[in-house]
Image (spheres, rainbow, N blue to C red):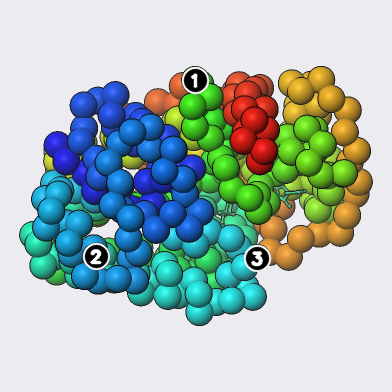
């Protein structure tokens, strides 16, 4: 099988490519390298291009003749999306339409799409959140992911496309061999920031809000190891060729940890007692966001292997230490 992977040089994309390679699946990554890295592909094929460039996508598809597409490429910073919404509607929605047009033109009709738990916004009392819960994004980033899901669903109805959308919860951790991991200069994610603080890159770690209605007052999230997430893409691809299609799935473990619990575990794993300060709430953070994963377990037979916060942090830490050699 041949799969075109947009954004394959990024964090989740590169882990997915590694797991596809282990299954003997041939990939071509289409990436503009704005945040991704060529080294993250571990020697797999790369076509440097931007999804804003219709000609370039068309060229890549005509050249590679993929059987399916996995679409990761997107802008992913919630805060940035609030400040610069048009960037998100262009990079995410408009560029996905470019990709879909090129796919249809060349008779490629299967796509796995990177969606996000951000489509739910702030779920009310229905946690763990199910796929059938109301989708009410609270920022442009989440809106773009939901809009793309709707486009895919309408195109599926018109028999133009067959899709699976994966709604990621909090992706974290790194490859067990520490060959790849998150390498994003402006990392905002809790575990990455905590580890960078442990290694001295930041002077202190801020806790954004300690007055939430949770047992210790800090937000609870469902942290999922990136290799389990990568595996969900492999299963989605296989499912598309076996008649499970046109569905959205949550990808998470269905259990959550608070910000304080994560920080304590980071200190325990790294054996470094870094400075932590309490700060005010960050805008748009739900108190509690945990996935119901019944649907993906039932329909895709997804069984997580790494539902273990210590393992997630340990692998991320091994990678973070390695990144230091590159001066990052
Ligand atoms: N947090 C801190 N201090 C930090 C960083 C984060 O206290 O320095 C807190 C946040 O306020 C939040 C929790 O840690 O309560 C997790 O925050 P992250 O930034 O790691 O992740 P989010 O839950 O905000 O974001 C994730 C994905 C987004 C997606 C969102 C859906 O990264 O892409 O889930 O809710 F949109």
Q: Is residue 255 shown left or right of residue 41?
A: right
Q: Nearer the viewer, residue 307 or 96?
A: 96
Return the disc, 1 or 2, that comes first in the chain's sequence: 2
Q: Residue at x 24, y 25 (%)?
A: 23
Give me the C-alpha separation between circle 1 and circle 3: 32 Å
Q: Considering the numbered disc 1 on the image, is that residue within a helix, a strand or a loop?
A: loop
Return the disc, 3 or 2, that comes first in the chain's sequence: 2
Q: Nearer the viewer, residue 123 or 111?
A: 111
| Looking at the image, residue 21 lies above or below residue 203 | above
Q: Quadrant of residue 40?
A: top left
Q: Counting other residues with Cα less than 10 Å from the Cα at mark 3, is it few (<14), some (14-19), or many (20 or more)?
A: some
Return the disc, 1 or 3, that comes first in the chain's sequence: 3
Percent of width and height locating residue 175: 49, 27
Whether residue 128 is visible, yes or no, is no
| Looking at the image, residue 17 lies above or below residue 56 | above
| Looking at the image, residue 92 lies above or below residue 275 | below
The disc at residue 79 is 3
Q: Is residue 7 shown left or right of residue 204?
A: left
Residue tagged 1: 177
Give me the C-alpha separation between circle 3 and circle 2: 30 Å
Give me the C-alpha separation between circle 1 and circle 2: 34 Å
Q: Quadrant of the N terminus?
A: top left
Q: Considering the numbered disc 3 on the image, is that residue within a helix, a strand or a loop?
A: helix
Percent of width and height locating residue 193: 72, 43
Judged from this view, the residue extending furthest toward the front is 326
Residue tagged 2: 56
Q: Considering the numbered disc 2 on the image, is that residue within a helix, a strand or a loop?
A: helix
Q: Is residue 269 shown left or right of residue 33?
A: right
Q: Closer to the observer: label 1 or label 2?
A: 2
């Amino acid at each position: 099988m041949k799969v075109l992977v947009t954004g394959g040089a990024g964090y989740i994309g590169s882990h997915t490519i590694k797991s596809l390679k282990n299954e003997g699946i041939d990939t071509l990554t289409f990436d503009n390298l704005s945040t991704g890295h060529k080294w993250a592909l571990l020697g797999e094929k790369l076509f440097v291009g931007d999804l804003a460039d219709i000609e370039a996508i068309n060229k890549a598809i005509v050249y590679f003749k993929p059987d399916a597409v996995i679409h990761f490429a997107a802008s992913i910073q919630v805060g940035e999306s609030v400040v610069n919404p048009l960037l998100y509607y262009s990079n995410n929605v408009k560029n996905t339409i470019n990709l879909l047009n090129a796919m249809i033109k060349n008779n490629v009709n299967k796509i796995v799409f990177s969606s996000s738990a951000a489509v739910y916004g702030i779920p009310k009392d229905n946690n763990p959140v199910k796929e059938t819960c109301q989708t009410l994004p609270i920022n442009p980033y989440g809106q773009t992911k939901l809009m793309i899901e709707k486009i895919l669903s309408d195109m599926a109805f018109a028999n133009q496309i067959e899709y699976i959308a994966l709604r990621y919860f909090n992706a974290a951790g790194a490859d067990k061999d520490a060959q790849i991991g998150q390498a994003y200069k402006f990392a905002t994610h809790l575990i990455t920031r905590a580890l960078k603080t442990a290694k001295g890159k930041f002077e202190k770690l801020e806790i954004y809000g300690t007055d939430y209605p949770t047992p210790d007052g800090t937000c609870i999230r469902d942290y999922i190891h990136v290799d389990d997430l990568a595996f969900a893409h492999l299963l989605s691809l296989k499912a598309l060729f076996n008649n499970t299609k046109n569905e959205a799935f949550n990808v998470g473990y269905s259990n959550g940890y608070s910000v304080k619990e994560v920080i304590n575990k980071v200190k325990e794993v790294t054996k470094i007692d870094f400075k932590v300060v309490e700060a005010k709430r960050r805008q748009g953070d739900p108190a509690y966001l945990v996935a119901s994963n019944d649907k993906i377990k039932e329909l895709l037979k997804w069984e997580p292997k790494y539902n273990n916060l210590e393992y997630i942090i340990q692998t991320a830490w091994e990678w973070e230490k390695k990144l230091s050699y590159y001066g990052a």
